[in-house]
Image (tube, helix red, strand yellow):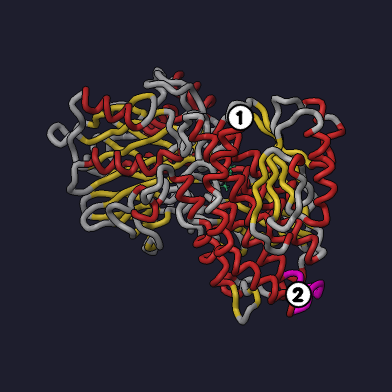
Amino acid sequence: MCGIVGYIGKKECTEVLLNGLSKLEYRGYDSAGIAVFDSKSKDIKTIKAKGRLKDLNDKLKTEGGLKGNCGIGHTRWATHGEPSDINSHPHGNARVTIVHNGIIENYKKLKEFLESQGYVFESQTDTETVAKLLDYYYDGKDPLECIKEVINEIEGSYALGILFKDFPDTIYAVRKDSPLIVGKGENESFIASDVPAILKYTKDYYLLDEDEIAVLDSSGVRFFTKFGKQIDKEVLTADFDEESAAKGGFEHYMLKEIYEQPNAIKMTVTPRISNGMPDFSESGLTDEMLNGYKRIFIIACGTAMHAATVGKYVIERLARVPVTVDLASEFRYRNPILSKQDLVILVSQSGETADTLAALRLAKNVGAATMGIVNVKGSSIARESDIVLYTHAGPEISVASTKAYMVQIAMFYLLAFKLAFIKKTISKDECKRLVSVICKVPEIIEKVLELSDTCSYVASKLISSENLLYIGRGLDYALSMEGSLKLKEISYIHSEAYAAGELKHGTISLVTEQMPVVAVATQRELFDKTMSNIKEVKSRGAKVVLITHKCMSVDEEAADYVIKLPTVDDMLMPMIAIVPLQLIAYYSSVLRGNDVDKPRNLAKSVTVE
Ligand code: F6R
């Protein structure tokens, strides 16, 4: 959470910084600010404001703007201290000014020390401690030495952009457990929390490793280890451009990303099929390795955890290998029983989620095999996992995840098919058949997207409710969890997902005319059971939305609104049935007048615990 940027070059940096921040607002939007080396005085000048980037823009206009070719910027997701002008970044003084993404865990102790040295704090942030600590160690001569001292003392996560007044037109940057890239342009350099922030200017970038320090000035970029040794780094090139990271005519990123799902599946699945069979050899995942795992743990947060739940159902059903799904924030503190024969799969769009990363490190410490299913190339989880299977969703900008979920489940299907074939629980022919079915899914989703108006109509019938239930059984329950999360996070309607058979053990007492129920029933062997549960809620006055297969016959009075989907194998129905759930959530948010892509209190990349 929080996004940082920095620019040194020939352009007016305010414009470059604001453009970069606009691409990072998904990481937090409680406040924003920039600090620039004033082109005349070479003093560091800062302007910051509570609120969105637009508020910063207004303030810049009122205060006459900032002129210069080198500066840093920040968009904040508040952790320590409420959103306010004073808590906004950049922080620091006339000598040292910084922007920070992450959390300094020992800031209280450091603050006490600095106060004992006469420093006076203005904000409630942990970041101000780093700014003052840099000032404390800075002797006016060597910024690198000062940064080395500071990173030895601070604990927690950080990506820092730093300006020292005595070194005009130079940016220093360092990171640990928070992402940071260094962009390489023609006579200009950048720092950014994520690649889209630099794409307008360059596709070339370096990945900064843990505790590496970058120095950006008019001669280019130099890199140093935390011991001060200069190092060379490989230049990477982004495999998407500015346009693919833009809205492309859609009203919101979320809608665009829902419509990108067919292509995202093709990009993720097609390169992993060889002679009609799933093939992971390019990622170094061999049949022997897959055959050797005794148990599988899948660890993730939020939407990625819901994808993991679909993964559990299909792997267990097809390959008969026991799978445990855990929330990363629980797993890391429950002292899990792991062994060297276990495979721990970490699922993450961003590849930077703090709890998922901590779970990965815990698994590695006990010697379990680790596999990341990750969307963002070169992210921490991708780099630290033994094996990485990249999903190819392209950049996902909307805070509410859609296409990343879709490709995560696509990856689990391929893994399940492969594992089942290796474990001899399905034949080669069956494996090939399943692969051919998943290859048809993109086409079928195109058809489901034609139901957009129906989903908008259904949403219009739900938005006056304050509470909602999602129900389903088996894979439909896994899907209901995601449908429910999607709705609540962007429409702010409270909703819960329940296993349909579990309702009568307590929750059904909540069901009244005021509590609509969205029922997902795509699993034929469970259809009659779910229909009975639907009758139970209907007879208690609930308005029911039913999502099912085209081929199922449904009594007219069974549900108030029925969304009938094209039919594929029941096992693959989550890839089809998630689409109307995403669209219902999307239109509910639009109809309620919410900020769809930037829901309140949230941020896209959760780099704090
Ligand atoms: C919800 C959503 C979140 C993320 C979760 C994990 O729409 O996007 O629940 O799924 O924060 O993020 P990643 O996948 O980046 O680890």
Q: Is residue 157 left or right of residue 386?
A: left
Where on the image, by quarter, is ligand 1? top right
Of the pair 17 and 147, the residue shown nearer to us: 17
Question: Is any atom of residue 606 visible in this view?
Answer: no
Specify few, some or many for label 2: CA neighbours under 10 Å numbering under 14, 14-19, or 20 or more. Answer: some
Residue 49: x and y in percent read: 34, 25
From what the image shows, is residue 28 above or below residue 286?
above
Residue 316: x and y in percent read: 79, 60
Stretch of the chain drawn in magenta: 419-428
Q: Residue at x 48, y 24 (%)?
A: 111
From what the image shows, is residue 430 above or below residue 81?
below
Q: Residue furthest bottom?
A: 275
| Residue 600 marker | none
Q: Residue furthest right?
A: 505
Closer to the chain start, of discs 1 and 2, is 2
Measured in 3D between alpha carbons, the distance from the residue under mark 1 to the one under mark 2, in whole angstroms, is: 44 Å
Of the pair 528 and 321, the residue shown nearer to us: 528
From what the image shows, is residue 117 above or below residue 493?
above
SS of the residue under disc 1: loop
Q: Residue furthest front?
A: 556
| Residue 422 marker | 2
Q: Nearer the viewer, mark 1 or mark 2?
A: 1
Residue 276: x and y in percent read: 63, 78
Q: Residue at x 44, y 45 (%)?
A: 253
From what the image shows, is residue 416 above or below residue 550?
below
Of the pair 314 and 501, the residue shown nearer to us: 501
Is 423 magenta? The answer is yes
Question: Which amino acid, mark 1?
Answer: Ile
Q: Residue at x 53, y 53 (%)?
A: 449
Q: Which residue is mark 1?
A: 493
Q: Residue at x 58, y 41 (%)?
A: 584
Question: Which amino acid, mark 2?
Answer: Ile
